[in-house]
Amino acid sequence: MDKARKVHRVIRSKPTLEGAGVHLNRVFGFNEPKGFDPFLLLDDFRSDIPENYLKGFPWHPHRGIETITYILDGNVEHGDSLGNRGVIGQGDVQWMTAGSGIIHQEMPKGDEAGRMGGFQLWANLPAAQKMMAPRYREVKSSQIPIVTSMSGAMIRVICGEVEGTKGPVRDIVTDPEYLDVTLPAGSEFSHPTPKEHTVLAYVIEGQAFFDAEKKTPVSNGALAQFDTGEEVVAFATDIPARFLLLSGKPIGEPVAWYGPIVMNTQRELEIAFDEYRNGTFIKE
């Protein structure tokens, strides 16, 4: 337990509007990228009101980052400048490396009951990889392994490794982990994390503790940001809990950020938007 990370702070997600008028909750983003390096933004777009999400995210550019979309309910139709078209549904993941530039759209459709649910995470790229060739990966729910721990915790391994089981998304620059962890009531879960990594846990169902003293409950819609350490320990209360566990290697470089483009300098941002306006944004 002495190696366990302590909770640095707990952050509640806040309502905001994005895209063409999508109501969502922003967990973090835009105002303090250094505190979450290599992660830039996390949005929670769970809703059961179709008019709050159907306008979607029409065609827009990205450069210099990766966007990771994880769907819990409903469907999202997508298309991009690489020629990819398709639908990501319940339990699926879209891991897009924008690199030198990609233009895409994401249009939520919801399920038969009108529910739409999921999360989008933005991860930064180091300067040396910001202009890499764009790469797109769609991972179906059936491709994501599930590990059940001795304590009964169920872990969907999207990226990273749990008890020798590796997730399908690999070879990512910032060496991230992305786990979907479900804890039965009263159970405990521990997971080793590289000491130098940034580690975050976003609770999406119930309530969990991430401190041994069980003094700081973290409930649905709140994020625990951890101090340094070598493992994360989580405890469910008298009801089950579910959370996304994210970790990644900090990049430690300057961040120049405007909208969907993240570079290292203001000049690089200006070049990106000039290229978008004059039609030279896409490099392949």
Image: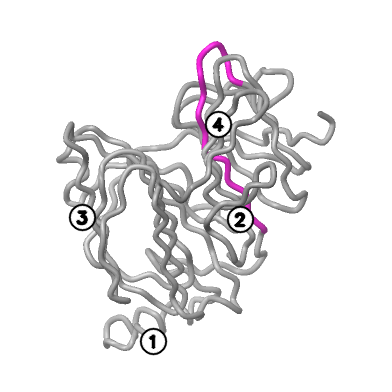
Q: Are marks 4 and 1 in contact (CB under 8 Å)?
A: no
Q: Which mark is residue 20?
A: 3
Magenta segment range? 236-249
**In this image, 239 relative to 3: left or right?**
left
Three-letter amino acid code at the position of disc 3: Ala
Mark 4, Cα crowd under 10 Å, few <14 / some 14-19 / many 20+, is: some
Does dot 3 land on a helix, a strand or a loop? Answer: loop
Give the residue at mark 4.
154
Mark pair 4, 1: CA separation = 42 Å
Q: Are marks 4 and 2 in contact (CB under 8 Å)?
A: no
Residue lying at 70% horizontally and 52% vertically, measured from the top left: 197
Mark 2, Cα crowd under 10 Å, few <14 / some 14-19 / many 20+, is: many
Residue lying at 52% horizontally and 40% vertically, measured from the top left: 156
**In this image, 79 relative to 227: left or right?**
left
**In this image, 279 relative to 272: left or right?**
left
Q: Quadrant of residue 45?
A: top left
Give the residue at mark 1.
283
Give the residue at mark 2.
176
Three-letter amino acid code at the position of disc 1: Lys
